[in-house]
Every structure is written in C-alpha cells, then in structure tokens.
Amino acid sequence: MRVLALERIDTDRADLVGGKAAGLAEAIRAGERVPAGFCVTTEAHRSGEVPRDEVAAAYEALGGGRVAVRSSATAEDLPDASFAGQQDTYLNVEGVDDLVAAVRHCWDSLRTDRARAYRRDRGIDEASVHMAVVVQRMIDPRAAGVLFTADPVTGTRGETVLDAVPGLGTAVVDGTADPDHYVVRPDGKVEGPGDGGCLTAEEVEALRASGERLQDHFGSPQDVEWAIDRDGTPWVLQSRAITTLFPLPPGRDDGPGVYLEAGHMQGMLRPFTPLGFASLTELTRDWFSSLSGGGASGLESWLVNVGGRLYLDLTALVRDPRTRAMVPEALGIYGPGAVRALQHLLDDPRFAPRQGRPLRAEAVLRGVRAAAPVLAKVAAGAALALWDPARTRERVFALGEQARAGTSRTPEWVVTARDRVEYARHLQSPVMSERMLPMLGPLYAGLTAAKLPEHLLSGVAEPSEVAAVLGGMPHNVTTAMDLELWRVAERAGEHRELLTGTPPGELAERYLAGDLPDIGLTGFLAAYGHRSAAEIDMGVPRWAEDPAPVFSAIANYLQVSDPEQSPERRFAAAAERAVRMRDELVCRLAATSPLRARLTAFLLDRARELSGLREYPKFVWLYALAEVRRQMLLVGAELVGQGRIDRADDVVFLDFEEVHDLLDGADLRGLVAQRRAEHRRELGRRRVPSLLLSDGTDLAVALPALPSGEGVEGELTGVAASPGTATGVARVVYDPAGATLAPGEILVAPTTDPGWTPLFMTAGGLVVETGSVVAHGPTVAREYGIPCVICVPGVTELVRDGQTITIDGSAGTIRVEEPEEPEEPGGLGTGED
C-alpha cells in the first residue's frame, strides 16, 4: 500500500504511515474535523520512487487545487519525541508535478543534519526511520495557531494554552510573529487579549473543547495545531502528545498535594531504577519500623516516586495549622527559591490550613517515644566525640570495617533465588541500625562544632572566613578516595599516551579482561569499587563493574603539568590556609572576649577533627547497597538461564514482588521493556521540578516574576557554598562518566555526589543547579579549597560550554564573560546520558 486515504489508515500501523498521519487518522476517528487528505506511505519511501499515478489519482479525488504536503516520519509525533520542526512542510502546493516534487523534498528532509542530530540525541536508530508524507486539502484560514491542553511551561494540567495569529499558523510555529496568547484556567476563566485578539470568546471555547476531547481520546495532554477558516469553521491540522511534561505525582483522595524533590541532596537528579527505588523504600520502612518500636509508622509513605525521582510529600505539613508557617524556613537549606515558592504556596487557597489532625499526631508521638532511647544514644555519642575525637574516629572506622566484612559474606540460609531476594530486600537495615546509627553522634557533633563558631564570631568575621577553616578537612573518606586515585594516576605516568588516548569505555573493557598494565587500580577498586555516580540507586553499576569513569578521572589527572596544581598540593594548601584562618579568627575574638575565643578555638578544633566523618556513614551504607545489587544480579543471571528474562540486569527494572512473580513463572518481558524505555527517556530530562504540585505545576517556574532591576546585568545569582573566586572556562557536564575537565576549568553541573568528586581535583571551581550547603558536593569543594556556588536554576543552559565565567563562592554569584571558542578536545564529554 503506497497511498492511503487518511480515513482508511489503521492507526496501529505507524510503521507504514508515520506518526503524523496516524495521529490525524485517530483524530478523525475521534470525530474531530480534519481536512481531507491522503498519505504516501513508507512503502513508497523504501522503494525510492514516488508512485506518481497513485498520487495523481488521490490528488484528483481530493478535487485538485491547493494542498499542504507534510512529513510523517516513523520517528515523529512519538509519545516521548515530537520532532517538531525537524522535517519539512510545503503549503499551497498545486498541480501533480509540484506535488510529486514536494513529496521528494519531504523525503530528503529526513536526512538533514538537524534531523539526524535530533534522532541521535534521542537514541533512535537511523536504519529504523522511514518517511511517509501527508497530503491534505489546504485550508484558507482567518486565524490559526497552536493549542496545548496543559501548560507546556509550568506543567499545569487542566489549563489550556492557545497561541493564535491571523492567517496561516506557521508564524506561531516558526516564531516569526508575536501571537495573541490565551490561557483558559481550570475554572473556565479566560485570560487573553480580549476583544483586541484574533479569536472570539466562542472560538476560544470551541478550540478548548476540541483539545479536551482529543486529550481524552489519546489519553495524554495534547499539542494541537488548528485553523479557523473564513466561514468560522475550526479544523484540526495535527494532534500529538506534549513530550516535555514532567510526570504527575500519584493521585490523592484529599485534594491537591505538594512534593519536594529530595534526591538532589544525595546528588541524585537522574531517575532511580524501579528496584533501586524499591530498595530505598524497603530500607525506610524497616528503619522507621525499628524506631517506632516495631510498628509501622507510616512515615515511609512520605517518599513518593515521580518520574523515577525521589520526592517528599509535604502536603500534611503545609495544611496543618501547627506546622505550615515553619515549612518555608525549614527549607532554607534548599536555597532561596524553595523558600519563596513555599511562602507563595501558603497563600494558595487550595492549601489553606485544615482543622483536625492531618499529621496523625498520636502516631508521631508514639514514634517519638519509641525513638527516645535512640536519640539518647546519639546524644551520648556526640558528647563522647567532643571529649575524645581520636578514639571516636577509631571506633567509627572499626564499625565501617565490620559492615564491609559483614556484607561480603552471604548467610548460610541463603540457598535459593527466592532466599536471595528476601536477603537483599532487608540487607540494608542491620547495617543501618547496628553500624551507621552509632556513627550519627560523632557526625552531629562535628556538624555542630562547625556551625556554632558562625554565631560566636558574628560581627568579628565574615561567614566565608569561618567556612575557610573547614578547608583541607582531614579524615574525609571521599577526599581520601580522590587523593588515592591521584596517586594511582601518578604511578601510571609511563602509560600516559595509552590512558589519555584511549576511550574510557575501551580501557574499562581491557582492564576487566586483564589486558592493561598494572597501575595499582585493583587496590583502589578493592577499597572504593562499591561507589559510583548516582550511587544511592542500587540499579546503577558500581565502579568495580564499570571502571570507565575512573579511567576518565585518571586521564584528567594526567593533564596536570604544573606541580603546584597537583591535587595533593592543593589539598595541603587548603589545610594550611584553614589553620592560619583558625588562628587569626581566635586572635581577633580574644581581643574582645577571651572566653568566647577559647570556646571558639575548641569548637573549630573539634570541627576539623570530626566534620570529615560526615561522608563516612553513607560510604558504609554503600557496602550494603552494592551487595544488594550483587545478590539481585545473581538472581537475574539465574532467571536468564531459565529463559525468563533476556539480561541479568532486567531485574533492576522490577520491584522485589515482581521478581518473586518472575520466579513463579510470570512473563514480564513487556513490562521490563516498557520501564527501560521510560527510564531511558527520563535520563534525557534536563530539568526536574524542585517543588511539584499534584496537577503537575512546577512551582518555581509558576511563581510571579521578581521585580525588574534586581541583580546585576550579566550576573547569575545562587547560594554561596564555598568561599573564594575563580575565573576559567566553563565545562557543562551532565554525567561524570567520560567527562573531561582540564586543570582550572570550572565544572557546571545539574547536581553532584561523591561519584563526581574525582573531577573536583582539577577543577578551578564548581557551579551546581541544585543542592544545599550541607550536601556532599559543596562540602567536598570547601575541603579542596575551590569556590562553589549552588542553587542556580537552569545554569547548565544559561552558561554555555566553553564560555569564560567568574564565580564568587563567597557572594554566590556567577559572571558570564564574552564567549570563547570551545577548546579541543571539547570538554562537554557527556552532554548525553
């Protein structure tokens, strides 16, 4: 079938007619008014010849005259990729010769550089893509434009957004006109130009109703192209899914909800795998159950999976009259944007305080009483740590070694695959309660000792000066890891050409095959191979499985030619500056208050003795997570042997109960494939809402604009996280695997975790979209003595890779200088996930 009338198209045959034609046929089936037309199918494209006679016959059946000729590729108008503007459209085509030529031009547009790049960025195989072409009777529009059944900017569902211009709607699509903008709120209220616009109120309502019908029919929010002819008749020219919307949170029975994205505190903006999220939920359930005396506290229900991201449900806190006023201030560690968004939300009538006891206070009180002995132990541990920090560190590190040894031995009772699943399911809880819990007292003691001097030195020292005392922090396992990797790179100097000239993935394969010179990497991976970027997701391979990111870091280190820029010397210099600043601050304070000076000296010393331990509990937890992954991959390998799944790591796209179903004989290949595709799609998402409403609204984006004139032109503002200034070339990196960062370049990233920190060793500074001053990235930046600015929304797009920027980690500002030519070899490295 080389030519098909639109109304005869089988909408399940997108492989034959492409996405656009299938969507139009479905719109016809839904009862919408669509201009008559036909489709030149992919069968004709595969043949390489336009079926002129069939095209001419179909054109004659339309009545001849002017037609629109539009591409309809098989990889077009997909649920997760619209391909808007990537292929060509030809309007007002008349006559068979011109029509045949337009079809050929549409075919040619499939292979343009822009279309190829778009497909490459989305992982679409070139060989799988073919082109169909839609030909429709040309509408002579009085007005035309685009309609969205959800706000494509804020994400708000239930809101219809229309852009309209007189005449052809191409001016809206290609951005050459300033359209009339209409917004229909969920309550039916219309905002727009009113009588001065090109649409009447009745036309706006008719278009809104059409969009709503299409949304109901397709089952998802729609991007609709439309036209109104000279007789006032509305026509649907195209309907496709809005591909950029962030997924909705789970529905609530008690009204709208508000959710805080919490994964970024652990450097986790990428989506969790399903088993990774299930593992985290099981840990939370076990943990809170133990704290509440064995009963389910319900607190784990605050963890919400939205698009694979970890969100906290704040709804009850915002609605409760006793807690709502405290919520914005409590979120101060997430930056001023979160505070402003929550303050704005408190004025939203949908989140007005409710009477009653929405927090189920009796359950909370029961949990507090059960947790009291735990809190007492934490307090005692903190006191002991302040009294004897050296002995405390010995005890903490001994607990870590016990956790490592314990998780490396599989219990004798674990025999069957089903045993492995249950062992893995609850493996983290004893590590948390028996090993990590005793570490919390020393950790909080260190954090408190680091924070109190800010108040004692108020009026005597700037916050950046106090922060400088925390530079070059000893006893930090992440710093120790990075410095050990630097020493591996030093030993590998004789193999510089091999390690810098070979792709990291190839080096990893050769290392795992035993086909690389010995540079001491085996010892490094024995100590740190249970880590990775996004390491709190057990579904992510560890460095021991895939050391490619480690080889990337080694290649970066081998670029350091100036001995003074070596990470070891930079770290030592930061430690020396910290000690000098400590002495200077104490001397300043002693001049006016000797007692406060002695207390400040004590606290600063204890901070340097203990604050480095803050990274250690997570490091220990990762032993358990890595073992959970190992056990589940063993189960996956057994299922592959039984022919139940195709790959061992298919299990990470299921939860624990679903793995049990597999063991019972269920066929879940389709579910695994669907979730792999969803995960791949979410990996490509650049922006994740920090505060999300249940109707999909990205609260930070929906906020009213700040008054004009605030800030400095050409300057971006965030939160100061590590003092100092630096000027250098910006390297925008979305994933540390394979990234290159030359010495002195400034790392610009959406988020960071300890898996990113090997890049810090050569960085001149750090800029991050999200985070908190107490998160891993800024903490390690302070310890390396490099300036850091966090909470700069959209900075990975506002700053272009290769631009020169100046960051001030004391003021929290980024100044973008004149753009420079990208340096070879091009440090973006991993612009794709």
Image (cartoon, rainbow, N blue to C red):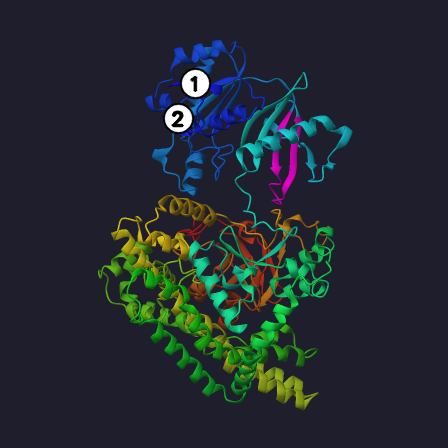
* Residue at image location 57% in from the left, 24% down from the top: 31
> Residue 258, percent across and down?
63, 54
Q: Nearer the viewer, residue 472 or 151?
A: 151
Q: Is residue 426 above or below residue 476?
A: above
Report whether residue 253 is seen: yes
> As displayed, is residue 354 above or below residue 102?
below
Is the residue marked by circle 1 packed among few (<14), some (14-19), or many (20+) residues within 10 Å? Answer: many
Q: Main secondary structure of the magenta part?
A: strand
Judge by depth and name the residue closer to the eye, 51 or 739.
51
In the depicted view, which residue is nearer to us: 614 or 247? 247
Residue receiving disc 1: 4
Depth order, front residue of 522/316: 316
Range drawn in magenta = 144-165
Side (left or right) of 799 relative to 712? left
Q: Which mark is residue 526?
A: none
Residue 144: where, in percent of width, then height? 63, 25
Q: Is residue 560 magenta?
A: no
